[in-house]
Amino acid sequence: MRDADERTIVVCFKPGAGRDFLPSVLRTLGIGGEPSPRWRWYDPGLLTVKIGHEVSLEMADRLRDRPEVKRLLLLPAGERMVSRRPGRPDSVVTLPNGAKIGGKSPIVIAGPCSVESESQACEVAAMVKDAGAGAFRGGAFKPRTDPYSFGGLGEQGLKCLARAREVTGLPIVTEVPDTDHLDIVADYADVIQIGSRNMHSFPLLFTVGSHRSGKPILLKRGFGATIDEFLLAAEYILLGRFYAGIEDPGIILCERGIRTFETSTRFTMDVGAIAVLKERTHLPVIADPSHAAGDRNYVLPLARAVLAAGSDGLLVEAHTDPLHAWSDANQSLGPEEFRSLMSDVGKLASLGLNRRPL
Ligand code: PEP
Ligand code: MN
């Protein structure tokens, strides 16, 4: 991922510290205060510096002791916050209903592509709960490729999701489209989703990561993004977490298919990415066979494939009346198909395939 001898130091300053002290801080690390590609300043108080081995642990400690420094992180050579470190526990996200993502058995997060009404949200939530889903997912703010497509019910949709949670007890997962809507989405959601198209919105990643709610974040892989780029997007969220002093990473990565020359499926599910991600990061990894397939007939085979590859769970589009879903009708599973998927998940879960390599 990076030069073997390059380490990174991340320094969070106390509120109101300003940046007058920056040149002297940088001098402590052996670099001058003038602009350089080695350091980056995030307003209002976060500094990242790429350092070599000439910076000793004692120098980092001296910096940590400065009165304007709130916290400091020294990343070992070649590592990022997102990196999996042997001997350190992998992170697990626990939802308010006790369901775990990254625990022993895979979770299924399911629901309609978009929330259409309170009754639709409640009916679909009851249907997926009865079949064994651990969380309910529905879109209230839908980023759409076609500007004339249905864009979601907005806040009204969030209220429908809240009602579905009240009725079923399932935690809700819903997408934040941009920073302007973060507060309102965080007020309702149990897990904040960042969609594939926003994986490259770096200020959004940082801002959601540092949001005071500290809510778990489900980050979908950009469909044109490499695994490295996906991990670096998660790193932006972790940088936000560090800045806000939120210790629990609370991030779920979601592989959702990448764009290739193949058009028979909507995207191409990158099954190998599941294995690579589980080796390279401590974060839980789930997969979305619905958007990868684009066709309900292929959702089950892809779901089996990603679970066999070690996925910690699935994100699946399901609907009580799939043919009439307001968005992504082609790929939405009906009640029968969803129950069949859940039965396959149960069988594969018993094999414990989502354990990570040692
Ligand atoms: C979604 O999950 O609703 C969605 C639109 O998926 P993606 O961001 O992966 O395209
Ligand atoms: Mn969809």
Image: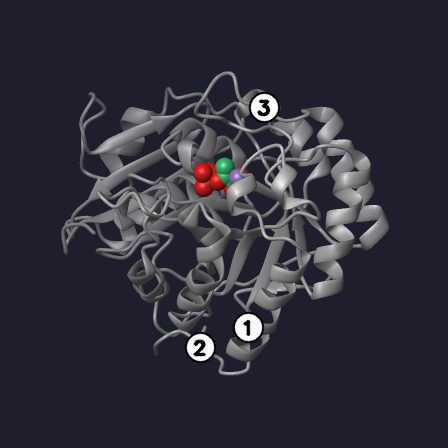
Sequence-first disc among 2 and 3: 3
The residue depicted at 36 percent of the width and 48 percent of the height is 257
**Badge number at residue 344:** 1
Determine which residue is flagged by label 3.
Answer: 150
Expressed as whole percent of the image width and height from the top left, the position of residue 137 reads 64, 46
Q: Amino acid at mark 1?
A: Asp
The CA span between labels 2 and 3 is 38 Å
User: Seen in the image, is 250 located left or right of residue 31?
Assistant: right
Q: What is the residue that sits farthest to the front in this orientation?
A: 323
**Quadrant in which the C terminus is drawn:** bottom left
Q: What is the residue that sits farthest to the top in this orientation?
A: 148
Sequence-first disc among 3 and 1: 3
User: Seen in the image, is 127 located left or right of residue 94?
Assistant: right
Determine which residue is flagged by label 2.
Answer: 353
- Location of residue 348 with respect to 150 vertically, above or below: below
The residue depicted at 47 percent of the width and 29 percent of the height is 204
Q: Amino acid at mark 2?
A: Leu
The CA span between labels 3 and 1 is 32 Å
- Mark 2 vs mark 3: give the one in front: 3
The quadrant in which residue 95 appears is bottom right
User: Seen in the image, is 1 located left or right of residue 285?
Assistant: left
- Location of residue 143 with respect to 296 vertically, above or below: above
Numbered disc 1: secondary structure: helix
User: Seen in the image, is 140 located left or right of residue 220?
Assistant: right
Numbered disc 2: secondary structure: loop
